[in-house]
């Protein structure tokens, strides 16, 4: 008998219910729509954390389920942020330039407006000309499409070249890291068209929106929660069907799956491209809340952190990826934000701002050695204990199959 999607994946309803309760709770306690117990800055932190949870889900799909350790998925995350950041910066600058030129004795020409915008945006790198990549920056619709298309196209081209050559294992990880490094180094250049090391700033100021930041922060928080819920639902749907069985087979024994007649490269490429698009959407929601994006955000170390989050949360468990990203992100904000108290030892004072990365590294090593299932493994342990004890003979050839007594009920 075919069971429904929800019946086969009961964790989906649990996750969505917890996410809805969390969203409702933050809304009630926020400054924008509630009693003001949660500050606007912390609402932004929570919204950014939800975006990091979404990109962690994408990372778990490609690493935990397909066995491909990609050290370049934060590059797709950053590209999504750049795409939406281009429109935000262009439109905000256009309004400023139009308002300034309107003070003159004669109405400005369209070319004067364009020149003024270019000078304001690119003057910091000694230019006033719009690069070709800004051709659609004046259109929100097109830039939103590029949020998905640019990371997806890069992943498609890179994945096609890598997978058709049957590059696997650590070599593929090195290639993805090299791709990320090359992209970051290119964006650091002033002639890249994205303002080099200066990046794109002022992204938290939405054009033509007069609402205060406490209200805008809640809008982005809701959008991040919705994206995480839909992304989690999509990820569970992907791994629960035939496609999920094939990619798990590729992870466990790629040669056998290929021998069975499946196009291994096609499955890898489809999943790699899909997860890149998810990462781009997460980045497009993250950076307007952060307010700025620069090439340092795309550095290879960021993708390594992403892998650490998934490992700590529990690789191969979508909820584990969410738990890992949320726990590490919030702890990082606490330790590096000066909220964690220093520990004086007499001869030395431990300042968590300096020691946070050491603590994170030790946590990763500890989880790898002693708890390879991560934090998510605790959920599995609890759920296993809640299951009823079985007595009697096995009905199937495998130990633990349905017992005779249970089958008769």
Image: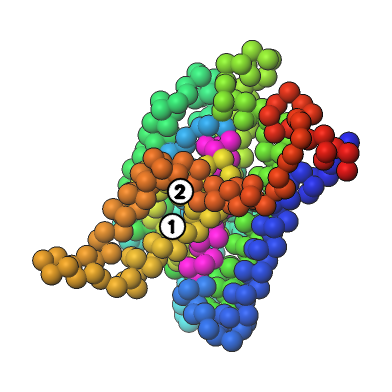
Question: Is the magenta region chiefly helix, strand or loop?
Answer: helix
Task: Identify residue for label 2.
Answer: 312
Q: Residue furthest left?
A: 347
Q: Nearer the viewer, mark 2 or mark 1?
A: 2
Q: Nearer the viewer, residue 396 or 190?
A: 396
Is residue 226 something that shows in the picture?
yes
Counting residues from the start of the chain, the first of labels 2 and 1 encountered is: 2
**Pointers 2 and 1 in contact (C-beta within 8 Å):** yes
Residue 37 is left or right of residue 357, and the answer is right
Q: Which residues are magenta?
A: 44-65
Magenta stretch: includes residue 229? no
Element under disc 1: helix
Residue sitting at x 82%, y 40%: 406
The N terminus lies in quadrant? top right
Q: Residue furthest top?
A: 259
On screen, residue 236 above or below 358: above
Is residue 208 something that shows in the picture?
no
Give how far across and how far down residue 26 sits, in percent: 59, 74
Task: Identify residue for label 1.
Answer: 328
Q: Nearer the viewer, residue 296 or 40?
A: 40
Give how far across and how far down residue 171 sits, in percent: 41, 25
């Amino acid at each position: 008998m075919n069971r429904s999607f929800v019946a086969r994946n009961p964790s989906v309803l649990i996750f969505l219910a917890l996410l809805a309760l969390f969203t409702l709770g933050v809304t009630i306690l926020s400054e924008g729509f509630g009693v003001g117990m949660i500050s606007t800055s912390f609402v932004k932190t929570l919204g950014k954390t939800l975006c990091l949870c979404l990109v962690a889900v994408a990372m778990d799909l490609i690493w935990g389920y397909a066995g491909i350790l990609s050290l370049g998925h934060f590059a797709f995350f950053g590209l999504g942020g750049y795409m939406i950041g281009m429109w935000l910066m262009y439109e905000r600058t256009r309004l400023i330039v139009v308002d300034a030129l309107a003070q003159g004795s004669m109405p400005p020409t369209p070319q004067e407006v364009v020149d003024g915008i270019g000078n304001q945006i690119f003057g910091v790198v000694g230019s006033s000309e719009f690069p070709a990549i800004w051709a659609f920056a004046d259109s929100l619709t097109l830039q939103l499409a590029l949020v998905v298309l640019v990371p997806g196209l890069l992943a498609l081209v890179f994945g096609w070249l890598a997978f058709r050559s049957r590059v696997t294992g650590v070599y593929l990880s090195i290639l993805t890291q090299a791709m990320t490094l090359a992209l970051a180094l290119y964006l650091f250049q002033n002639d890249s068209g994205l303002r080099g090391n200066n990046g794109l700033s002022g992204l938290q100021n939405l054009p033509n929106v007069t609402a205060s930041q406490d209200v805008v922060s809640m809008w982005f928080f809701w959008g991040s929660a919705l994206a995480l819920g839909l992304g989690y639902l999509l990820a569970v749907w992907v791994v629960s069907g035939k496609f999920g069985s094939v990619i798990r087979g590729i992870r466990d024994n790629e040669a056998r799956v290929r021998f069975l007649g499946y196009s291994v490269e096609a499955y890898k490429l489809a999943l790699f491209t899909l997860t890149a698009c998810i990462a781009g959407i997460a980045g497009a929601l993250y950076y307007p809340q952060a307010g700025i994006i620069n090439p340092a955000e795309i550095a290879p170390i960021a993708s390594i952190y992403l892998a650490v989050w998934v490992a700590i949360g529990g690789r191969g468990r979508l909820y584990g990826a969410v738990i890992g990203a949320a726990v590490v992100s919030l702890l990082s904000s606490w330790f590096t934000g000066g909220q964690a108290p220093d520990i004086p030892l007499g001869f030395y004072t431990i300042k968590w701002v300096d020691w946070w990365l050491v603590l994170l590294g030790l946590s990763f090593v500890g989880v790898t050695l002693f708890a390879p299932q991560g934090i998510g493994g605790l959920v599995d342990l609890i759920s296993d204990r809640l299951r009823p004890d079985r007595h009697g003979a096995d009905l199937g050839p495998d130990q633990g199959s349905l017992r005779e007594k249970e089958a008769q009920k």
